[in-house]
Amino acid sequence: ETTETLPLFPLGGVVYTPNSEHILNIFEPRYRQMYNDILMNGSKRFVVSMSHPNEEGRFAQVGVLFSLEELKEVSEMTADQVKYICNHRVTGRVKLHKVLNPEAWESRDTYLKVKGTIIDDTGLLDEEKNDNDSDEAMDESIPQSMVAELKKAAAFDAMEKSPEEEALLQSFSDLVELQHDLTEDVRFTRASVKSFGVA
C-alpha cells in the first residue's frame, strides 16, 4: 500500500457507506478550487472525514474516498450562490496519516490536503485500475461535458464588473474584514469575498 496526497473535505457527523451516492452543493471558493483541481489533474476524487465536534482542526483517522461521477455548473442559475452540484460515489476508505497544510483550516484560503493510504473496500478501484490498463481505456479522459462546464465557470468568474458592482464588492470586503476584526461569529469568510457575485 502506498500513501497519496489527497484533498480533504471535512463534513459533519454523517456516516458514509461503501457504494453509496451523495450530492454536494459547492459554494465556498476553496472547494470550488478543489473541484477545479481534481478535474484538471484527472483524479476526480477526494477524502471526506468527520471533524472533531469540540477540537478545531482535528479529524477522524479514517475517512471515505468520494469519486466524482457528475458535475453540473449552476452559478448562473443560482446568482453564483452555488457554483457546482456534484454527484459522488463512495469507492473506499482512506487512512489519514497527516494533514499537510493545517493552517488552511483556520485561514480557509484553500482546501486541506492530507497524506493517506487508500483502502479499497468496494473493489471499484481495482476495476478502474484494470480498465485503465486496457487499450480501450487509453482513449478515455475527463468527459467533455465536465471540461465544458469548467470552462464556462472560469469564463463567468472572469467577467468584468461595472463600477457599481466593484463598489458593492469593496463594501462586502470591508464588512467581512470588520467582522473578523471585531471577532464576531464568522458569517462570511475572507475567501467568500472572491466568490461574491451580483445578480
Image (spheres, rainbow, N blue to C red):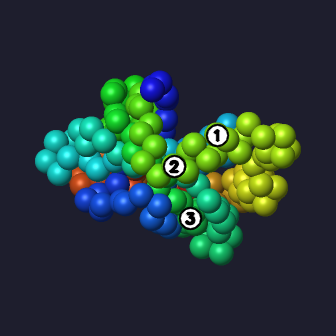
Position of residue 162 relative to residue 194, above or below, is below
Q: Which is in the foreground here, disc 3 or disc 1? A: 1
Query: Residue at 67% of width from left, 37% of height from top?
Result: 41
Query: Residue at 36% of width from left, 60% of height from top?
Result: 16
Residue 47, image x and y in percent?
Answer: 44, 44
**Which residue occupies the foreground of this view, 78 or 41?**
41
Q: Which residue is mark 1?
A: 129
Q: Quadrant of residue 57?
A: top left
11 vs 7, left or right, is left
Q: Which residue is mark 2?
A: 123
The amino acid marked with disc number 2 is: Gly
The amino acid marked with disc number 3 is: Asn
- Dot 3 or dot 1, earlier in sequence: 3
The amino acid marked with disc number 1 is: Lys
The single residue placed furthest to the bottom in the displayed view is: 77
Q: Which is in the foreground here, disc 3 or disc 2? A: 2
The single residue placed furthest to the left in the displayed view is: 54
Do tag 3 and tag 2 residues touch (Cβ < 8 Å)? no
Q: How many marks?
A: 3
Residue 138, image x and y in percent?
Answer: 82, 40
Position of residue 63 relative to residue 103, above or below, is below
143 vs 105, left or right, is right
